[in-house]
């Protein structure tokens, strides 16, 4: 029997049958699911040929916008809530462990290591002075010494250093002390827009959304034997906490940046890392679901 003359009704089953021959089990599952959902999307939306081509052009422009400094596809994933969904699936919520959130596109590996107490803002950097202090502990409350604490933030003008030509600023790495403590200086983070001069910006406008994120400090905290924690601390009272453009806010990560006697903002937070391997492998999770 010739395998041809497909119709809207019969096509999906044949595509699924063909990609079902993929020798790698995971690749088979991923591509079959993609075909199933993509065909369902097209059946639901019923695009005209012009609309379908507009979609292709949109994705093409998104790709052209990407280089070593700008990743428009990650931004797309962030603003459509996909990055947070992947984060929920992979990091989850475990006991008192600090919750995670999006990494974002402005992390830079190998930021300068600074001694505890240093200011991550270069002299003359505009912004309200801020002191950040806290601890890194495990789930049993034991201090974690020598944890690597990577921190970065945007400037008072709403831009990260990598978006400007002036070199490294407002990012550093610290090590917790023997009691798991850390402290450093920075500027109080302010709300800022995600890059919105490309296809993602157009998508936000077309869907009636703003590009703003509430003010936050980024952290990546690593220690041997623990899962890497990727998170933020958000500023309590920020007007964008309930409409973050990338859906990253969690109550447990909102901090009251209180003023001290010297008029500086103080942000205090105790991070809790979970032991490595508490996550389940993707294959095991998939099996449980079906
Ligand atoms: C950020 O917080 O740096 C960020 C996160 C997601 C998209 C854009 C920016
Ligand atoms: Fe950020």
Image (cartoon, rainbow, N blue to C red):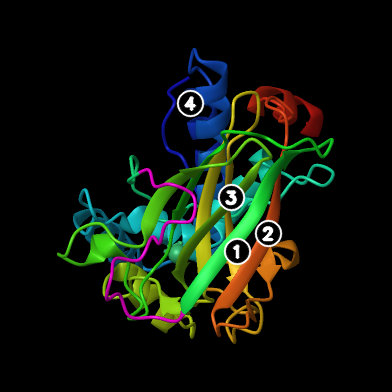
Report the residue at 48% width, 52% height from top. 103
Q: Earlier in the sequence, mark 2 or mark 1?
A: 1
Residue on which disc 4 sits: 19
Q: x, y (%) of residue 284?
A: 73, 23
**Mark 1 residue CB less than 8 A from any atom of ligand 2:** no
Q: Counting other residues with Cα less than 10 Å from the Cα at mark 1, is it few (<14), some (14-19), or many (20 or more)?
A: many
Residue on which disc 3 sits: 182
The segment highlighted magenta reads: 113-128
Q: Nearer the viewer, residue 282 or 155?
A: 155
Disc number lying in front (1 or 4)? 1
Q: Earlier in the sequence, mark 3 or mark 2?
A: 3
Q: Earlier in the sequence, mark 1 or mark 3?
A: 3
Residue on which disc 1 sits: 233
Q: On the rendering, which quadrant does ligand 1 occupy?
A: bottom left
> Separation of disc 3 and disc 2 at Cα?
10 Å
Q: Counting other residues with Cα less than 10 Å from the Cα at mark 4, is it few (<14), some (14-19), or many (20 or more)?
A: some
> Separation of disc 1 and disc 3 at Cα?
15 Å
């Amino acid at each position: 029997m010739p395998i041809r003359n497909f119709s809207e009704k019969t096509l999906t089953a044949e595509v699924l049958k063909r990609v079902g021959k993929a020798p790698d089990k995971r690749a088979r599952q991923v591509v079959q699911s993609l075909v199933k959902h993509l065909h369902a999307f097209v059946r639901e939306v019923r695009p005209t040929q012009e609309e379908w081509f507009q979609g292709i052009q949109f994705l093409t422009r998104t790709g052209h916008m990407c280089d070593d400094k700008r990743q428009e596809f990650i931004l797309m994933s962030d603003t459509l809530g996909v990055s947070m969904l992947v984060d929920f699936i992979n990091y989850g919520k475990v006991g008192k462990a600090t919750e995670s959130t999006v990494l974002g596109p402005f992390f830079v590996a190998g930021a300068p290591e600074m001694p505890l107490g240093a200011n991550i803002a270069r002299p003359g950097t505009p912004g309200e002075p801020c002191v950040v202090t806290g601890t890194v502990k495990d789930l049993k409350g034991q201090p974690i010494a020598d944890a690597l604490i990577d921190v970065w933030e945007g400037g008072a003008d709403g831009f990260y250093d990598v978006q400007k030509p002036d070199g490294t600023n407002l990012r550093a790495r610290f090590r917790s002390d023997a009691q798991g403590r850390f402290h450093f200086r920075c500027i109080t983070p302010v709300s800022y827009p995600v890059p919105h001069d490309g296809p993602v910006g157009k998508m936000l406008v077309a869907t009636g959304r703003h590009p703003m994120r509430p003010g936050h400090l980024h952290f990546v905290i690593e220690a041997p034997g623990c899962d890497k924690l990727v998170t933020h601390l958000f500023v309590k009272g920020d007007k964008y906490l309930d409409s973050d453009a990338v859906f990253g806010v969690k109550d447990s990560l909102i901090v009251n940046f209180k003023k001290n006697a010297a008029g500086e903002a103080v942000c205090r937070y105790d991070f809790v890392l979970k032991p490595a391997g508490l996550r389940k492998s993707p294959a095991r999770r998939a099996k449980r679901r079906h």
